[in-house]
Image (cartoon, rainbow, N blue to C red):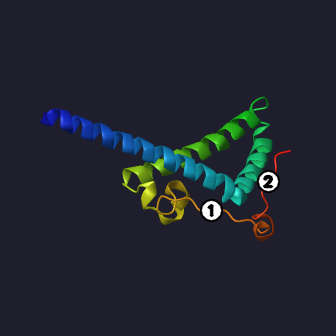
Amino acid sequence: MQLAQERSLLGTAGLMQIKSFLVWSFTLAICLLVVGFPLVAIASTAGMLLAVALQSVLPTSAVLVVGGGLIGGSIFAVFAGAAVLTLKGIHPHDVRWLHWLHGKDGQLEVVKFAACPLTCSIDRVAG
């Protein structure tokens, strides 16, 4: 009986680790795309210059090597960051700025539009 309980706890902990890793991977990838746009612009500029420089050495595959290296490096950085955060035990629900992940006290906010005082009392007539 105790062995079955230990296995279920290990399975639950393993699933939580996988869930944490996947959430961190998604969050870091979005942050790289949105917040890291200047970094992406600088990396692509450096990649273009490197591709031009490598064109004399690797005439047929310089762009492929440089592009693959930049994309692979970005993916590796996201997954390595997610792995480090997961292995350190930092769970996404512990991070304050990830409130969109679990909501505010489990409740979603009601969106109010600027035109609501003018249009909220009007019933929609199906026509």
**Where is mark 2, residue-wise?**
124
Q: Which sits in the foreground, 74 or 62?
A: 74
The front one of 85 and 7 is 7
Question: As rendered, which of 86 and 71 lies closer to the eye?
Answer: 86
Q: Locate residue 120: give its quadrant.
A: bottom right
Q: Label 1: which residue?
A: 110
Residue at 53% in and 47% down: 25
Mark 1: which amino acid? Answer: Val
**Which circle, 1 or 2, is nearer the viewer?**
2
Q: Is residue 27 left or right of residue 127?
A: left
For residue 25, which numbered disc appears in the image?
none
Q: Is residue 71 left or right of residue 54?
A: left
What residue sits 50% from the left and 51% below the top? 81
Classify 10 Å Cα crowding around label 2: few (below 14), some (14-19), many (20 and above). Answer: few
Residue occupying the far top of the picture:
60
User: x, y percentage for residue 37?
Assistant: 71, 57
Please state if 19 lies on the left or on the right of 69 as rendered.
Answer: left
Tell me if mark 1 has few (under 14), some (14-19) or many (20+) residues whose alpha carbon lies within 10 angstroms of its own. Answer: few
Disc nearer the start of the sequence (1/2): 1
Total number of numbered discs in the rendering:
2
Residue 40 location (% of width, % of height): 70, 53
122, above or below 56, in the image? below
Q: Amino acid at mark 2?
A: Arg
Q: Mark 1: which secondary structure?
A: loop
Image quarter of residue 112: bottom right
The residue at 61%/46% (across/down) is 74
Nearest the camera: 4 or 49? 4
- Which residue appears at 86% of the width and 44% of the height? 127
